[in-house]
Image (cartoon, grey):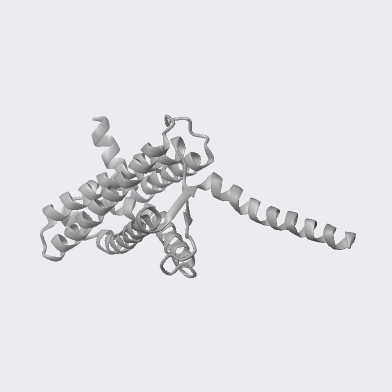
Amino acid sequence: MATTTQRRLAKEHPKAITGILSLVGYALVLGAFAGVIPLFPPLSEQTVILFSDLIAIVNSLALFVILIGWRFIRRGEVQKHRVAMLTAFALICVFLVLYLWKVGGGFEKSFVVENGQFLASIIKPIYLLMLAIHIGLSVLAVPVVLYAVVLGLTHTPTELAETAHARVGRIAVASWSISLALGIVTYLLLNHVYGWVPREEAVLLFLAVPARQLWYSAKSDDRTDRH
């Protein structure tokens, strides 16, 4: 009875349900980054690396299943499309658990390029641009994807034809796919092509470089004054 009532409420108020679920998702991510959600056991550096690899695998599978699901609906195979998209959504939920645990129990990585590496002078801005687009699309895709899923779960195929499911679904597939693809590319650049350091170390390094320059400058001025 309760399940029927909940489904009826979701069917009658899909935007409200989408809004609530989106806010919960945003709160979990922000809480993990801020360290205010003490739900995740601490992870060693090796486990963080393992989680990064698992996340990339999960995202690759999700991207593949999304594209397959898109292909199914283009052919009019509604039931296969439904299974594919719900599978993709389940994979994204797995990603979210792994990602929150990696951030909350481990650390984030900062991109490092050494002199002499391929495209060393321009790759970091390119990487940061791809990362920004990936993150931006991830944030924007959350309510769009959730709205499409809520409609799909609460309406029959006939009823869906009278909703915004197809239009919203196209936006969801596009934003979701581009975000996942860029996430996979940035993962490869960060973990297998160039290098990384824990973000805390990167901040310290960023602060240490100008401090060292100021120290050398002060020493040079001191020597000049003596002469």
Question: Which is nearer the eye, 118 or 154?
Answer: 118
* Residue 143 appears left or right of 222: left
Above or below, 36 relative to 213: above
Residue located farthest toward the front when viewing the structure as drawn: 227
The answer to which image quadrant residue 175 occupies is bottom left
Residue at coordinates 44% horizontally, 41% vertically from top-left? 103
- The residue sitting at the right extreme is 226
Spot occupied by residue 199 in the image (x, y as percentages of width and height): 52, 47
The image shows residue 134 at horizontal and vertical percentages of 40, 59
- The number of discs equals 0
Residue 68: image x %, image y %?
17, 59
Q: Quadrant of the N terminus?
A: top left
Measuring 31% from the left and 60% from the top, which residue is drawn there? 181
Quadrant in which the C terminus appears: bottom right
Task: Quadrant for residue 29, please give it.
Answer: top left
- Looking at the image, residue 174 lies above or below residue 151: below
* Residue found at x 12% / y 53%: 80
| Residue 12 percent location from the top left of the image | 31, 47
